[in-house]
Amino acid sequence: MHYCPMKVMAMRSQQYVKTGICEKYQTLLEECERALANWNERRAKITQSRLVGKEEGDELLRLQVKYARAYTVLQNHTPHCTFCQLVKRLERRESDAVFDGARYR
């Protein structure tokens, strides 16, 4: 799995409402962001120190898997959460209203 900054930016741009409503989503989001930060920090340290070996590779793979799991749990939460589904519908309505308003100007 490769780190995708556009996916993370899109994920962050949708969080402001969900995190105010769903505590579980907030917790999962924080876990995901922490896992990503840990993976990025360790990768940067290994790159800077030019450490290359099985141990470092295994550690990076472990951190990458931890991030991938956290991201998957976060993404799988929304379809099964009543609060998150409500927010998703509200966001869709707001987006449609903005689009319609811009189209008829």
Image (cartoon, rainbow, N blue to C red):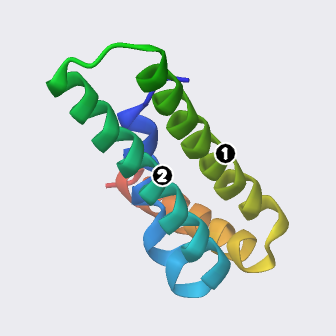
Category of crowding for the residue at label 1, using alpha-carbon neighbours closer than 10 angstroms: few (below 14), some (14–19), many (at least 20): some
The quadrant in which the C terminus is found is bottom left
Mark yes or no: residue 22 visible: no
Q: Are marks 1 and 2 in contact (CB under 8 Å)?
A: yes
Residue 85 x/y as whole percent: 74, 69
Residue 64 x/y as whole percent: 53, 35
Label at residue 35: 2
Q: Is residue 30 left or right of residue 75?
A: left
Q: Amino acid type of disc 1?
A: Arg
Please give the residue where the numbered disc 1 appears in the rendered image. Answer: 69
Q: Is residue 38 above or below residue 54?
A: below
Residue shown at 65%/57% (left/top)? 74
Residue 28 lies in quadrant: bottom right
Q: Secondary structure at mark 1?
A: helix
The quadrant in which the N terminus is found is top right
The answer for how far apart the CA atoms under marks 1 and 2 are is 9 Å
Q: Secondary structure at mark 2?
A: helix
